[in-house]
Image (cartoon, rainbow, N blue to C red):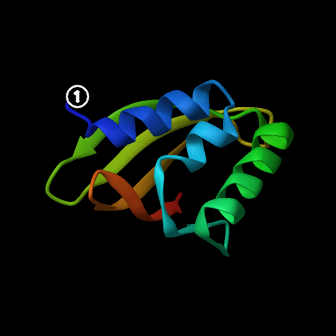
Amino acid sequence: MNLPNIISELVKAQNQFDSHAYADCFTETAVVFDEGKTHNGKTEIQNWIDTANKEYKATMKPLDYNEKENVLSAEISGTFPGSPLILKYYFELSEGLIDSLKITG
C-alpha cells in the first residue's frame, strides 16, 4: 500500500499512543471530525487523541488507501465495544500535512 508519508506518520503515532506526534501531523488550523464532534487546531486535536488513547487504546491497521480520494480504510482495535471496527479516514492534505480529517464507520 502506497500511503502518503504524513498518513504513515499518523498511523505510526496512533499505534505508539503518541498524541504529540499525532498532532504534529496536522496543520495549525486543521479540523478533525469524529464521533459527531469537531476538533479545531493542533491543541484541540492533541487533547482529543490523548483522551481517546487513554480511554480506548486504539491501534490502526491500514487495509486500503484510495489515492484519488485520499481515503484510508483501517481496522481499529482497542478497548471499546465492537472492537475491532473498520473505519474510513477522509483526508485533505496541505503542504505535506493534514488539513482536515473526517472519520466514519
| Amino acid at circle 1 | Met
Q: Nearer the viewer, residue 72 or 23?
A: 23
Residue name at image x 53 percent, y 47 percent: 24
- Residue 32, image x and y in percent? 55, 66
Residue name at image x 26 percent, y 36 percent: 3
Crowding around mark 1 (Cα neighbors within 10 Å: few <14, some 14 to 19, many 20+) is few
Q: Nearer the viewer, residue 77 or 102?
A: 102
Say left or right for 47 vs 100.
right
Say left or right for 11 vs 54.
left
- Residue 21, image x and y in percent? 58, 37
Residue name at image x 60 percent, y 69 percent: 41
Q: Secondary structure at mark 1?
A: loop
Q: Nearer the viewer, residue 99 or 73?
A: 99
> Where the N terminus falls, by quadrant?
top left
- Residue 91, image x and y in percent? 36, 59
From this view, report whether residue 99 is shown above or below residue 21.
below
From this view, report whether residue 48 is shown above or below residue 31.
above
Residue name at image x 48 percent, y 39 percent: 10
From this view, report whether residue 55 is shown above or below residue 105.
above
Residue furthest toward the right? 55
Which residue in the protein does label 1 denote? 1
